[in-house]
Image (cartoon, rainbow, N blue to C red):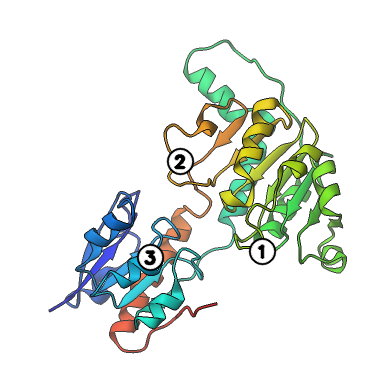
Amino acid sequence: MPHRCAVLDDYQNVARKMADWSAVSGEVEVTVFHQPLGDEECVIEALREFSVICLMRERTPFPRAVIEALPNLKLLVTTGARNNAIDVAAAQARGVTVCGTGGRAHHTAELAFGLILDLARNISFEHARLKAGERWQTTLGLELNEKTLGVLGLGKLGSRLAHYARAFDMRVIAWSQNLTPERCQELGIEYVSKEELFRQSDFLSIHLVLSARTRGLVTARDLSLMKPTAFLINTSRGPIVEKEALLDALRTGRIAGAGLDVYDVEPLPLDHPLRGLPNVVLTPHLGYVTLDNYRVFFRDMVADIRAWLDGRPVRVLNPK
């Protein structure tokens, strides 16, 4: 009898097109879910009969309660090399193998710079007005040349964004909890304190992994240090920024605006206050959602299943 495999949260209905699933046909019966399953009880009810479950990043959390309530679960495959929404220790204790996939490195930094350009030149705002037949030209844009980009987190994505910014002749400064002046010097970037990062930046972009140490790292005090003409960009994770502090800064004009791809709750509820703010550009967590990246995700997903069926699992994730 074939394994039942659930592919979750395939919002774009592309899972079957992005990879050759024939490598596991006959041994695996694949069911694709295109919409969020709902709360934990709904997830458990929908997935009770499946032994293999494939996840798209953190769209559907798999805490201990969910893992322990799925009696047939044998293999979890997540896109990407880590997934903080999976309790890997709980899975290991249940004898469930957890595997990851490869991925590309450019997508989120490119989106972050796209949000910077949008905010600087009012692209989406003027686009919407033009489509609606409103009056021709209503805003004045900003040139990025000689503006200061602050990078909060100078890892792979942050350093890539800094590279893009230098091509636009921007000044780049950076800070994070582990960053050193020596690392900044290697990359040709100015090292500053956290306070000066917020004070000096015209655009401040966040590139950190969400953890106990970074949750709520950007506080009301930090936002109060920013210029009233400055913009905050977040393509990392919503809870890195204190939600109410950001809403207050945007409502009161403490900062000029924000470009956000990530939120405290996803999908973003229809009544979420961010949807009604005119000085925010919102995108629905598009950072990793590219054709090139999805091809890697789903190719490796199929390969992970095949290797597990053969008794030689690859890209196995272990508890931290």
Residue 255, given in percent of the width and then of the height, sits at 73, 32
Q: Amino acid at mark 1?
A: Lys
Q: Is residue 104 left or right of residue 34?
A: right
Label 2: few (<14), some or many (≥20) within 10 Å?
some
Rendered view: 290 above or below 202: below
Q: Earlier in the sequence, mark 1 or mark 2?
A: 1
Q: Nearer the viewer, residue 106 or 60?
A: 60
Give the alpha-carbon distance from disc 1 to disc 2, as whole Å. Answer: 27 Å
**Can you tell which of label 1 and label 2 is closer to the viewer?**
2
Q: Looking at the rendering, which quadrant does residue 258 occupy?
A: top right
Rendered view: 42 above or below 70: above
Q: Amino acid at mark 3?
A: Phe
- Residue drawn at x 75%, y 29% is 142
Provide the residue designation for mark 1: 156
- Quarter of the image with the C terminus is bottom right
- Helix, strand or loop under label 3: helix
- Residue drawn at x 67%, y 19% is 139
Q: Is residue 143 left or right of residue 181?
A: left
Residue 279, given in percent of the width and then of the height, sits at 62, 28
- Residue drawn at x 80%, y 55% is 174
Q: Looking at the rendering, which quadrant does residue 118 occupy?
A: top right
Q: Amino acid at mark 2?
A: Leu
Rendered view: 318 above or below 257: below
- Helix, strand or loop under label 2: loop
Provide the residue designation for mark 3: 298
Single out the residue that lies furthest toward the top: 135
Residue 157, given in percent of the width and then of the height, sits at 65, 59
Give the alpha-carbon distance from disc 3 to disc 2, as whole Å. Answer: 25 Å
Provide the residue designation for mark 2: 268
Q: Nearer the viewer, residue 314 or 245?
A: 245
